Image (cartoon, rainbow, N blue to C red):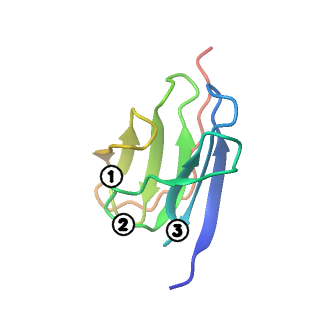
Amino acid sequence: DAHTLHYCDFDPHATGGLLICGWEAGLLVSTDGGKRWEDRTAGLPNRRIWSAAFDPDIPGRIYAAPYLAPLHASDDGGRTWRPLQWETAIVYDLLFVPRR
């Protein structure tokens, strides 16, 4: 299977925090500016992640949009996930406006 990267984001709460996601690539997180990457896809319904983003207001929270699955959230940097809404959604982009 081909792996395609769709999105990346910088963690506004942690220096060196990054995430990337994509089709069959799943969701990968780095805490050291991209030197090492950890697969944080476990707990998501599939490895086809259209978009993912760090929450600008809540440290450690990540949102992920798997293909034809609910939007998911993690409060521990992607180690565990919970479904939120839109049972069979295709979310192409996530945009947050910080409250601060």
Task: Tell me: residue 1, above or below residue 43.
Answer: below
* Label 3 neighbour load within 10 Å: few <14, some 14-19, many 20+: many
Mark closest to the chain's N terminus, 2 or 1: 2
Which residue in the structure is indicated by mark 1?
Answer: 86
* Residue at the extreme top of the image, as rendered: 100
Residue 69 % position (x, y): 33, 60
Mark 2 lies on a secondary structure that is: loop
Which residue in the structure is indicated by mark 3?
Answer: 25
Residue located at (45% from left, 50% from top): 64
Residue 77 % position (x, y): 46, 38
Of residues 19 and 87, the one nearer the viewer is 19
Task: Tell me: residue 31, above or below residue 22.
Answer: above
Mark closest to the chain's N terminus, 3 or 1: 3
Q: CA distance from mark 3 to mark 1?
A: 22 Å
Q: CA distance from mark 2 to mark 1?
A: 15 Å
Give the residue type that dot 1 points to: Trp
